[in-house]
Amino acid sequence: MSNRDQVLVVDEMSDTADVLRAVLEPRGLSVNRVRRYEPPELPIPDPRPAVVVLDADAQEAPAAQAWHNVPLVVIGQVRITESPVADAPGAPAQRHFLQKPFQFAELVQAVERMIARQRSIG
């Protein structure tokens, strides 16, 4: 299994990871979870995951900044303006923002779109 097959969930609650596991693992993806990402104590996993799902309400700003080269789904209370998505290989990683409360179907679709994009450019 390559890094393109891995989704990392950074969330104190297990519900998000549990739902993603139930939906994505039968489709051949691996879903792992850490409660918090606290650099520099917790290094970025090697190989890097294909997508990181980050609960912004439970994390500090450095956690989101650490994933600047990895597609990132940010879940939070505050709506953040999305940065444009570049289609060229080597372009900045894609970001997707979900405002709480959100539907798990929205999250699954966002992760699947990012995985598909990673596979198409790499």
Image (cartoon, helix red, strand yellow):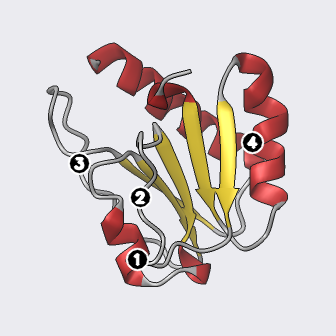
Q: Is 2 in front, or is 87?
A: 2
Q: CA distance from mark 4 to mark 3?
A: 25 Å
> Tag 3: residue type?
Pro
Mark 3: secondary structure: loop
Q: Is 25 in front, or is 95?
A: 25
- Would residue 70 appear left or right of 26 to someone viewing this image? left
- Would residue 54 appear left or right of 17 to someone viewing this image? left
Mark 4: secondary structure: helix
Q: Position of residue 79 (x, y in %)?
A: 47, 72
Q: Nearer the viewer, mark 4 or mark 3?
A: 4
**Residue at which label 1 appears:** 39
**Residue at which label 3 appears:** 84
> Tag 4: residue type?
Leu
Q: Residue at x 55, y 26 (%)?
A: 5
Badge 2 local density, few (<14 within 10 Å), some, or many (20+)? some
Determine contact: label 1, label 2, CB under 8 Å.
Answer: yes
